[in-house]
Structure formats: structure tokens, C-alpha cells
Amino acid sequence: MKILILGAGGREYSIARAILNEDQEHEIFFMPGNGATNNLGTNLDIKDYDKLADYAKENSIELTIVGPEAPLVDGVVDIFKAKDLTIFGPSKEAAQLEGSKVYMKNFLAKYNIPTAKYIETASIEDAFKFTETLTAPIVVKADGLCGGKGVIIAQSHDEAKVAISEMLSGKSFGSAGLKVIVEEFLDGYELSMFAVCDGEDYILLPAAQDHKRLLDGDEGPNTGGMGAYAPTPLVDEELYQKVRDRVIRPTLDGMKKEGAPFEGVLFIGIMVVNGEPITLEFNVRFGDPECEILMPLMTSSVSDMFLKASTNRLSEIKVEFSKQFAVGVVMASGNYPYSSSTPAEIIVDEVHHEDVKNFTHISYAGVSLEDGVLYADGGRVLVCVGLGDSIKQARDRAYLRCGQVHYAGKKIRTDIAYQAL
């Protein structure tokens, strides 16, 4: 099958890698891809979605998979479907679940899906007034897309008011922050859950935990994610069932009523408070780095799951996962997440250790290729993934692999999966 993957990160790399590990023959194209994806397929440079759809048509692309949120919010799925192409992802209207936090919170309230107490407003006075009704810490969110960084957890009322002022003035996140959500802080533990949906049916994948903060012990600024592991032992079947009944089913039914059936990945950020799942947010694509650890755990056909979800036939398949655990450790560039870093040559040692050879791999993200040399040139450069029969074994293997990757300024957390261990 000829498959086109939109995106340039570790998420897209890991989806392609999982598809190429299947028994059947596939040919992969990336738009735009990164400096390492051309080892897996062909990188394209066609930024106009109309022209990209024409290319897919002319080259008999049988399936397109959209990785990041921006093309979805921009309506790439609608453009491809208008040309009778099979594409995995939500429509522009359905992608508002991530594209607008205000839309998402109002949707949750409308369909009685458990979420934190909140106000959505463009009024600084109303935001300040609501802030006074909450106990610190207080959560302040920009309405639009901010690359996973538009959420501030303020430790005091004053800090919350500064965040609100800077967002509403356009200083923090430009037009993405001209409407804000202020909400109560929920005290519990956070989970990433992913449901692959076809508008009617869905498949819930094993729950993962992401590490958002830059430094060990969950210190430092928020990032796009410094590592993740799955499945997490913090979820039992009862909790999965609560998420199915209280979050996923009412969301799919609600989106149908809104005239925007949800197809693609529903990424649910859950806070578990006293055993009850509360919805923090929705995203409309796989998380990164969660995708990098979920893909290698799938033992059934990855391409078939994406194809059946794109053609409303999920009920025909059973998706299966190995009994192993996966841990992914992100290696970032020196100045991440504050500013861009000078490109640095990446040197990967030859692997001699059998465990590392058989149970680890690298998913490349922020890398470029020049004259056959791979350079670290993005914020999050790559993810070292380890598999094992326990979380500890998977984690130890992932860190062994990290020790074999070298570039100037490399930055990692040393405590990924500590919640479970």
C-alpha cells in the first residue's frame, strides 16, 4: 500500500516505522518529513494542501495519515475527502475540539462530560473576578493552538492575573490567547488516553503517562513532553470503563449531534481525582512522545487500523497489543524549550549489546541531513524507546540507548516513568 504521512516529528517517524515492520509491502511518503525519515520513505515538499491532494491522486496514494494538529485545524481532511482520497483524521469542524479550548470546554459542559469548573472569556474583569473564587494553584489556558505550551499553572492569584493579562493583550501567545479559559486546578494524577475513532465506533489504546516538565522531579517549565511510558499500572479495568462510558461514548454521540462526526484520534488528557476520571482537555491527534511508545506495542496491523478507521469500518477488526511495556526518553537540544539551538552533529555508537539491539530503537524528530551527516536542529531531537517485560526493564533499556547517542548540548530527564516505579 502507498501511504502518505503528514508531519515531521518523532510521532510520524514512529508511525512509519511500525507500518514498515508489518509483513506486507508498503511504500511511505512524508510531507515534509525530517532528516531521518528519508531512510523510511520519500520526503515531499508540497506545502499547499490542494496540490498535495493532487499529488496523492496522481501517485495512487491509498491512505494519508495526518500526524500534527495544525493541518487538521486548517482543514486538510476536508480537502482530501473532496477529491475522494482516503485520509485518517478529523474534519476541520471536528478538529475544533483541539483548535479551540473554548469550543472544547463548552462541548464538555453541553454533553455533561466531567471537567474542571471554568470560565471562558475575553474580558479581563470577568477573568479576574472568577479567579478570586478559586483556590490557588489556578489554571490559565490560551484558547488557540500554542504547540502544547498554552497552559499556565499559576501558583498564586497574582501570578494567574499576570498570565491572564499577558494572554488577553496578545503578549504571550498572539491571537491564540485573545480568549482565555480560567479553571480550577485538579489535584490527582494525569493520564494520556487515546481512542482511535471512525465516527461511530472506537478502539481504546493502553493508557500512557507523559512527563511535561523539563527537569527531573517535574520541575522547570512545561514542554511538549520529555518522555512517556505505557501501559501505566495506575489504570485498572474499572477506570477504563468509566472513561469509555463518561467521556468517549458521549463525545462521539455529541459530535454526531453537532453535525461533525469525529474520525481520527481522540487524545483525552485525564486527571484522576479520587478514582474518578475528569477531562482536562482533548487533542485530535496522537500525543508526542506517547505515539512513539504505543506504536511498537501494537502486534496487529497498524496500517489496517488507520485504513479501517478512515473508512468507517473499525468494527471489522480487533487491535492487539503485546504484554510488554514501553518507555520513551526524549533527547532535546541545549536551549530547549527557551530558544533554538545551533545545529549539532549526531553520533550514534554501533550497538553490540544484544538487549539494546533487540529491544530498543530511536525515533527521530528535530533532525536535518546535510551531506550524509545527521544534525540535531530542533527542540526535541529524538526519542530513545525501550521495550521490556516490566517498566523498569523497559526504562533501563531506553536509557542504555540514550547513552549511545551523542551531540553537543544533549538534554534529557533521568527519571522517566518514576510515577510507576
Image (cartoon, rainbow, N blue to C red):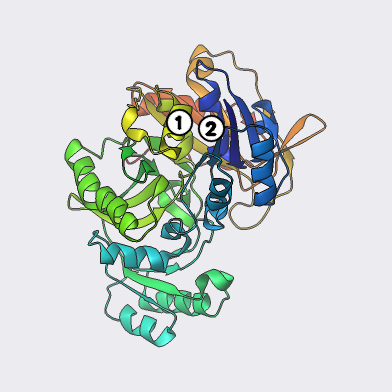
Most foreground residue, 30 or 371: 30
Q: Is residue 23 left or right of residue 332?
A: left
Is the C-beta separation of discs 1 and 2 under 8 Å? yes
Mark 1 belongs to which amino acid?
Met
Residue where numbered disc 2 is placed: 14
Residue 324, image x and y in percent? 35, 23
Residue 322, image x and y in percent? 35, 22
- Quarter occupied by residue 124: bottom left
**Residue 172 visible, this angle:** no
Most foreground residue, 78 or 90: 78
Label at residue 345: none
Q: Quadrant of the N terminus?
A: top right
SS at circle 2: helix
Mark 1 → mark 2, Cα distance in angstroms = 7 Å
The answer to whether residue 39 is above or below residue 368 is: above
Residue 3, image x and y in percent? 58, 32
Most foreground residue, 87 or 395: 87
What residue is rendered at 20% in x and 37% in y?
236
What residue is rendered at 28% in x and 53% in y?
253
Label at residue 295: 1
Residue 18, image x and y in percent? 51, 26
Label 1 Cα crowd, 10 Å radius (few <14 / some 14-19 / many 20+): some
- Quarter occupied by residue 234: top left
Q: Is residue 104 left or right of residue 366?
A: left
- Nearest to N terminus: mark 1 or mark 2: 2
SS at circle 1: helix
- The residue furthest bottom is 125
Q: Quadrant of the C terminus?
A: top left
Q: Is residue 297 left or right of residue 221?
A: left
Mark 2 belongs to which amino acid?
Ser
**Residue 266 visible, this angle:** yes
